[in-house]
Image: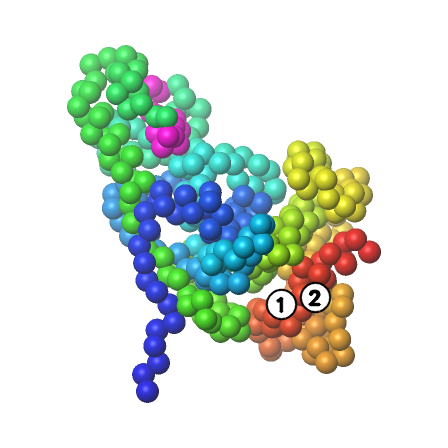
Amino acid sequence: MMIGEKFTLMQYSVSAILGLIEAGQFVIPEIQRPFVWKRSQVRDLIDSLYKGYPTGYIITWKNPDVKTKDGMVAGGKHVLIDGQQRVTALMAAISGLEVLDEDFNRDRVKIAFNPLATDPTKRFEVQDASHLKDKKWIPDISVIFKPDFKQRAFENQYASLNEGVDLDEVSEELTKLKAIANRQIGVIELDHTLEIDEVTEIFIRINSKGTPLSQSDFVISKMAADTSHNGNVLRKVVDYFCHLAVKPDFYLQVQKDTEFAATPYAQKIKWLSKDNEDIYDPDYGDMLRVAFMYSFTEVDFPIWSVCFRDVILKRENSKRRSLRNPTRDLMRAYKHSSMSTTLHSLFLQ
């Protein structure tokens, strides 16, 4: 008997994907998670979309059991399996949102555009001071994609700053740039009937040229979708704890999150704002494994022991690690535990 395909291949426009993110239908931890792409990679992605080149697939898994805050069944949100960096790049360059770099500094990634460029390889650049001085450059393309953008007024202003410019040429190039919002990106949606073990296996086999989502990112994405246990707040607990462990002054940003500041978790992690020791700074994977170990049972001991051993030996030679797959172990641990309940107990004990 032929086995049916366990995925659906679809096409979404760039604007549709950004709209789904804004509407909370794509569960992506991109704003709170470090963005590891180089800025030149963001530029190249925008250039590829401008030229109509393929940019790879985004892979999601639709969870059918997610409940909304009002207690209704949402019918499933899309948990991102692969493509986080590309989606975050779009949010940064086109939507104009800030991202966190690897050092947990919040910053914009601004892509400049020269509609008069004679060399097509020099049409887009990562913004620097020269693009602010040279009026041929539009220093930040995100302004073009704002809902209230008035193209004719913008073209007239551009022409006033660049004497002798061909307005028709500028208008044509701006129209091409705006067309990025309608470019189609392939989305592979894994079947909603798949069990987490099978999704994990698919996740392990993904071979992407980009930066794939790590196992801890995958678990946190799944946890963020668990609205029945306030998973998004618990996701922030893990995020903020790890941020503060590296940059104690990040607590000023935590305080600006009024929703989180009103929770008991905010006070529980406040001590990190005065902790300047850097002997060991846990990452997301470490935090999740500790949470899994916190309330293990004797039956589950083999799973937890492997997770714990992976944390302890993670910085040693890979040959000394367990032969078992740590990603699969982490996913199995997730399946057989209540992540939300465990994290709640761990932080509020």
Residue 141 drawn in magenta: yes
Tell me the CA gap for discs 2 and 1. 8 Å
Image height of 201 relative to 44, above or below:
below
Residue at image x 41%, y 60%? 59
Labelled pair 2, 1 in contact (Cβ < 8 Å)? yes
Q: Position of residue 347 (x, y in %)?
A: 76, 54
In the image, which residues are magenta? 134-147
**Does residue 202 appear left or right of residue 217 in this picture?**
left
Q: For the C terminus, give its image quadrant.
A: bottom right
Image height of 5 relative to 123, above or below:
below
**Mark 1 crowd level (few <14, some 14–19, many ≥20, 10 Å Cα):** some
Q: Is residue 247 visible?
A: no
Type of amino acid at the residue the image marks with label 2: Phe
Q: Position of residue 123 (x, y in %)?
A: 29, 33
Which residue matches tag 2? 292
**Mark 2 crowd level (few <14, some 14–19, many ≥20, 10 Å Cα):** many
Q: Secondary structure at mark 1?
A: helix
Q: Main secondary structure of the magenta part?
A: loop
Q: For the N terminus, give its image quadrant.
A: bottom left
Q: Earlier in the sequence, mark 2 or mark 1?
A: 2
Which residue matches tag 1? 334
Q: Position of residue 145 (x, y in %)?
A: 36, 32
Q: Quadrant of residue 90?
A: top left
**Does residue 119 appear left or right of residue 297 in this picture?**
left
